[in-house]
Image (tube, rainbow, N blue to C red):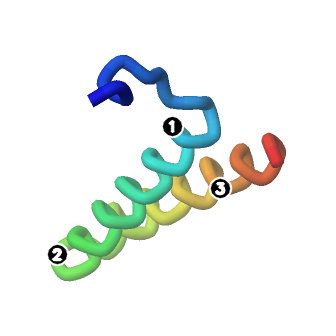
C-alpha cells in the first residue's frame, strides 16, 4: 500500500526495459529474425548502461 507512489530508480527502470526488450526479441524470433536481432542488440546496449551504473 505504501509503495504505490514510490518512484523507480534509474537502475530499476533500465532493468525493466532490458527485460521487456528480451521478451520482445524472443517473441519476434519465431516470425522475424532481423527484428529479433535488432531487439537483442538494443537490450545489450541497455545492459551496458546498467553496468556503467553499478
Query: Which residue is denoted by mark 3 in the rendering?
Result: 47
Indicate the secondary structure of the residue bearing disc 2: loop
Residue 36 locus on image (x, y percent): 35, 68
Residue 31: x percent and y percent?
Answer: 16, 75
Left or right of 47, for residue 3: left
* Numbered disc 1: secondary structure: helix
Q: Which mark is residue 13?
A: 1
Distance between mark 2 and mark 3 Cα atoms = 25 Å
- Where residue 44 appears, x then y in whole percent? 61, 60
Which residue shows up at 72% across the image and 44% down it?
49
Residue 31 circle label: 2
Above or below, 11 against 3 in this view is below
Q: Marks 1/3: CA distance? A: 12 Å
The percent position of residue 15, horizontal first and vertical second, equals 53, 50
For the residue pair 14 and 48, the one nearer the viewer reads as 14
Question: What secondary structure is found at the residue carrying circle 3?
Answer: helix
State the residue at coordinates (79%, 41%): 53
Disc 1: CA contacts within 10 A as few (<14), some (14-19) or many (>=20):
few
Q: Are marks 2 and 3 in contact (CB under 8 Å)?
A: no
Q: Are marks 1 and 2 in contact (CB under 8 Å)?
A: no
Amino acid at each position: 500500500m505504501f509503495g504505490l507512489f514510490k518512484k523507480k530508480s534509474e537502475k530499476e527502470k533500465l532493468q525493466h526495459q532490458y527485460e521487456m526488450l528480451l521478451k520482445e526479441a524472443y517473441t519476434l524470433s519465431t516470425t522475424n529474425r532481423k527484428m529479433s536481432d535488432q531487439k537483442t542488440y538494443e537490450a545489450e546496449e541497455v545492459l551496458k548502461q546498467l553496468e556503467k551504473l553499478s
